[in-house]
Amino acid sequence: MNSRGSRSSSPAPSRVSGPRGGPRLRHGPMRWGRGPGAGMTGRDPGEPHRTATSLELLFDLCFVIAVAQASHSLNTAVTAGDYTGGCLRFALVFFTIWWAWMNFTWFASAYDPDDVPYRLTVLLQITGSLVLAAGVPRAFEDGDLRVITLGYMMLRVTLAALWLRAARSDRRRRRTALRFATGVTACQVGWVGLLFVPAPVRLPGIIVMIAAEVAVPVWAQSAGMTPWHPHHIAERYELFTLIVLGESVAAATTAVRDALDRHHSAWALYALAAGGLLMVFAMWWLYFARPAHTLLATTHRAHRRRFTWAYGHYLVFASATASGAGMAAYAQLVTRRTDVSALAAGAAVTVPVAIFLITVWAVHVRPHRRRGLGRFLFPACAVAVLAAACSPAPALVAGLLLAALVVVVTVTDRPGRAARVEG
């Protein structure tokens, strides 16, 4: 994978032969920058061969820890019978993870200069993500938001600094950049303030702060659009989808392994393992069945559609993460390490998968499928997956339903794909 796309303002990486004849990158010299605003005039949205950088991949890798902590905490809450409270805390905690990741992703797509000041700032953000991850268990178990707020503050303050640097350098979009910096800073002050309010008032305050955070990009972009790159954004979202799916596999594998070590109901565990694999494979297949960059480069250039696609992925990522926690909870039911009912444990497996299907259909598939019976396939399958919670093997039944959906989608897409190739 290329470490970055070519730029006219810096030495472009050149391709040379790797040890097996494949492409390898040779980088130009590191740029230190000439000042706080140097090198942030905006990337070219039509830049060819723009890919995720190695720094962005490191950023994602460290966010895996926070995602894993959120998944484990949700599993603990479900197996303890705290369904409503656990799901609510998971939704709130995962919002901070997703929101910090998404804001950096869109900023990097617009301005990444890959110089020393930028790299050091992003490394500080990565440190913030690790602090945030350390605070997830406390937020779940005790409602202690101090550590997670500290990590989130590190992520957001450094992002505001990047926006100020962009405002100084990019005169055409200075108003937009200043709005971003102002909004991010104001919201962070609000989050810190929530630490000092009484506990009964904290939840309404969190909801207000989430609404404010979500409104900042809409308000800032109304002053002018930043030069984000469709292929780059699509790749970044695809990579994070792989991360959350991988976390689901890891959580379920660990739970099944521990259950097998205790020699409990081997058939039920094998059904859970087989169904879990089918679900993850099918979720990957269905998400990547249609290229996101074609939407982002055409119809989703409009503000409303772009924000719907970007924000809708919160449910895609959260539900994929929660599916792993649900499978882990069901494994504990099989080993009789929890007192939750079979229906509740089955719902922990199937509800996240149904949400994933509906959200992927709404933001990622439906814009491609506006006619025919194909537009009803995903919702119908989601309803059937929900009903699978009542079956003796919910994961296996849900996995078979998803596999059937993959077959139908692949067959019905074949004529359209052939036509695109011939065209």
Image (tube, helix red, strand yellow):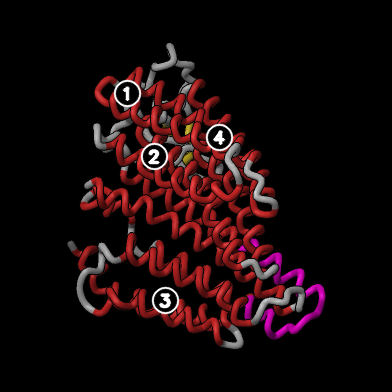
Q: At numbered mark 1, what does the secondary structure look like: helix, strand or loop? A: loop
Amino acid type at mark 3? Ala
Q: Residue at x 76, y 69 (%)?
A: 258
Amino acid type at mark 4? Val
In the displayed structure image, the side of residue 206 where residue 416 appears, left or right: left
In the displayed structure image, the side of residue 144 where residue 305 appears, left or right: left
- Nearer mark to the viewer, of 2 and 4: 4
Cα–Cα span, label 2 and label 1: 15 Å
Residue hosting label 3: 382
Cα–Cα span, label 4 and label 1: 32 Å
**Position in image of residue 4 (x %, y %):** 43, 35
Q: At numbered mark 2, what does the secondary structure look like: helix, strand or loop? A: helix
Amino acid type at mark 1? Thr
In the displayed structure image, the side of residue 323 where residue 265 appears, left or right: right
Q: Is residue 10 visible?
A: no
Cα–Cα span, label 2 and label 3: 31 Å
Examine the image and state in which quarter residue 219 appears. Answer: top left
Q: Is residue 267 magenta?
A: yes
Q: Residue 192: give its label.
A: 4
Q: Is residue 260 magenta?
A: yes
- Nearer-the-camera pick, 51 or 388: 388
The chief SS type of the magenta part is helix
Task: Identify the mark nearer the N-term, 3 or 4.
Answer: 4
The crowding category of the residue bearing disc 2, from other C-alpha atoms within 10 Å (few below 14, some 14 to 19, many at least 20), is some
Residue hosting label 1: 41
Task: Identify the mark nearer the N-term, 2 or 4.
Answer: 2
Residue hosting label 2: 106
Cα–Cα span, label 2 and label 4: 24 Å
Q: Residue furthest right?
A: 262
Task: Identify the mark nearer the N-term, 4 or 1.
Answer: 1
